[in-house]
Structure formats: C-alpha cells, structure tokens
Image: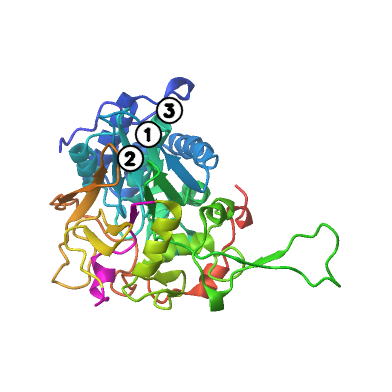
Amino acid sequence: MDANPPSQIPLSWPPEDALTLDWIHSLTTALEWASWKLPPSGLPSVLPVPVLLRLLLTASNILHKEPNCLRIDPQGEETSVVVVGDVHGQLHDVLFLLKDAGFPSDKRFFVFNGDYVDRGAWGVETFLILLAWKVFLPERVYLLRGNHESKYCTSVYGFEKEVMEKYGEQGKQVYRKFLRCFEGLPLASIIAGNVYTAHGGVFRGAAVIPSKRSKRKKGRKPIVIADSNSLRLGSLEELLKARRTVLDPPWEGSNLIPGDVLWSDPSLNPGLSPNNERGIGLLWGPDCTEEFLKKNKFKLIIRSHEGPDARDKRQDLKGMHEGYTIDHVVESGRLITLFSAPDYPQFQATEERYNNQGAYIVLSPPDYSTPTFHSFDAVKPRPKVNPYYDFEEVIDSDEELDLKAMESSTSVEDLTPI
C-alpha cells in the first residue's frame, strides 16, 4: 500500500448527485488506504462528514421506497446473480469478493443478505462502499437487512463505538443517520421467482382474532396477534405488510415477522418452535422448508446469520468451514446457509482461530436455482487495529440477548433530534 495518500483525498460529493464508477473506485481506494495508513480518528480527513451524510441520505431515500420483499427478475442468457452472506465489517475481504466475483454491472446483479457491520473493525467503510454501489446501480445491487443492522446489536458488538471513534464530536449525528438507513433495508428477496433469500430465514404467520361483538365498533379491524401456541408459516402477503422500520425487531406482540426473518435458524427437528437459544425468532425443520418452498413454488432458500462460532455450538448441523452449508434437502428443493466473512470473527479470544473460509454464490440462467459456490480465504495480513467491543466478554453467536435493552429501542424518531 502506497504511503502517499490518493490524489482524490478528501473526497467530495459528485456534481448533481451523479455517482459514477470512477467515484466509487475513488471512494474504495481512499477508504482502503485509510484503513492501512491512518488512525480511526483520521477518517474524516478522507471522507468528510457532509459527504458521508449525503451518501447515507441518498441511499436511504432509495431503500425506504423498496418493498419488504424484493422481486428480482434478471433477464438475458449472460446475466448472473451473486448472493453474499454476512461480511461483518471485514473490509478487505469484501473488496476481494467484489473483484473475484466481478463488480456489479448491467449483467451482474448482487444480493447482499445483511450483517454489514459489527465485530469487524471497518463496518463504516464496508457499508458505505456497498451503499455507493446501491446508489449507482439501484436495480442491480440489493441490500437486505441483517440482525446486526439494529440499535441493540450495534451498541453491543462494536459499530456504535466504531462510529464514535472515527467521527468524534459528530459521531452521534452520524450514528443516527446510519440507524435511519438500517431501518430502510428490505427484509427478503425473491430471485427469478425461484429463490428466496433472507438473513435468518422463514417467519410465522399472524393469527387473526375478531373482537367480541358486544365491544366491536362498526368498521373496527380484527385484532392481529402472533400466537406462539399455534405457530404456522407466514405468507408472502404477510411479509409484505409487516412494519420493518423499527430499530430493534420485537420478540413479542403483533409485529414479529421482522424479528423472525432476521433471527431465525434452521433445525433438523421437524416443525416450528420458538428459538429459545437466541431469545427471538424461530427454529424450523425440513418439513417447514418443504412447505415454504412448495407453497410459494420456490426451489431454493439462501439464508445467512450463522458463522463458524454459532455452528460450533450446534451439533445438529454442519460447521461453517467452507463458508456455506446445505442444511435441508427436501422434495421441492434445498436450504443453504451462506457466510461470507472468512477467518471470522476478526477478534477471537482463543489462540486457536476458526480460520474458516467465506463464500459467495453465483446463480445463472435459465432458472437461477442451481447455485455455484465460490469459497475463499481471508485477505492477510490485515491492518493492525483495536477492537471496538470487548470480544473476550461478549458472546460470539448472538445468544442470550438482553431483551430489556432491546425493548428500550423503538424507532429513530425516539432519538434526540439533530
């Protein structure tokens, strides 16, 4: 890495809001250089706050207009779709992935399955580069939400502190704008009518219970609640209607679908059940995968959410050594877990590291339902940097959540105004 700063530093916002490929490459080059040559507090000299906020606002305006579940319909014999799992602020591995898979283009779609930040030291840089691609190619690059795109997780696993250390006195303002952007991220996608992708996976349906006649006023809508005693798979219509603009998806009440989509895990045991290990979301078995695929005429589910640390605690499913696992094989298709952060987590409390590979998937014509897996090793060495959370004390696999802390967060509007 050249010791001299790139000529485009400090970055400025492009005229007439017209992001170009050259601008994105300049942003990428500058942020990568800064990761090697500057302390975290030096980032504003490369990416000034006004430029950062303009990028967040421009991207937020696009994301908030997208539906909860995106329908992505690639056209053409040479058009492919790249699906990416968790990246967790591992900037240099993300840059390798983009080069290895080929950058987004007219004929190369990208679907990112969430968890852009936390644990890794460059969540700010990673997410901003992906947002720039989203703004440049809004109908080719799709960013879904992960469970770490929340106020609770970013306060525990490092992203909030990362923003504060990098942007100092303006850190609170910058952090609020990131949270606002997180709220706009869609929850799921359907690719070519055959492939469902989401960070955690499937979700429950809501039970509709009419009010008592004696108390029900004319025109009053039925009460909708989530009945944990009679769990059933939810429909795509219910997914589309769910309220996603919450900082921390609820684990109880009438709006459980976002929490399920972001936090649920597959199991080899049949049926739907509460995900007691995490304290939020569901566990679902192969029978539920078959039902979901068959009902929606899908052939494949691609979810993420579980890295090598999470799988190390589970004896029922395969380890995440190659960056992906095939968890369910049923009559109608398959369920795949995809994880794109190699040598994860970046900061590990034991001398023996997981040293896992990351992976991405390429889906190709004609039906985009036959995945091609690409595993890759971590880019090393990484720049020396201190963690932004107490990785020796904080559990790695998002278990035993402090639900009371989550309950204290509802929406960005509840935060102190700028």
> Quick one: label 3, few (<14), some, or many (20+) residues within 10 Å?
some
Residue contact at pointers 2 and 1, CB within 8 angstroms: yes
Q: Is residue 328 magenta?
A: no
Residue 86 drawn above or below residue 320: above
Provide the secondary structure element on which disc 1 rests. loop
Residue contact at pointers 3 and 2, CB within 8 angstroms: no
- Which amino acid, mark 3? Trp
Q: Residue at x 58, y 73 (%)?
A: 227
- Coordinates of residue 89 in the picture (x, y in percent): 31, 52
Cα–Cα gap, marks 2 and 1 = 6 Å
Answer whether residue 337 is visible to the viewer in this image: yes
Q: Nearer the viewer, residue 60 or 336?
A: 336
Q: Nearer the viewer, residue 316 or 391?
A: 316
- Which amino acid, mark 2? Phe
For label 3, the residue is: 13
Q: Quadrant of the N terminus?
A: top left
> Quick one: label 1, few (<14), some, or many (20+) residues within 10 Å?
many
> Which stretch did the figure color magenta?
298-316
Provide the secondary structure element on which disc 3 rests. loop
Q: Which of 13 and 299 is in front in this view?
A: 299
For label 2, the residue is: 110
> Quick one: label 2, few (<14), some, or many (20+) residues within 10 Å?
many
- Coordinates of residue 40 in the picture (x, y in percent): 32, 49
- Which amino acid, mark 1? Arg
For label 1, the residue is: 140
Is residue 268 shown left or right of residue 402? left
Cα–Cα gap, marks 3 and 2 = 24 Å
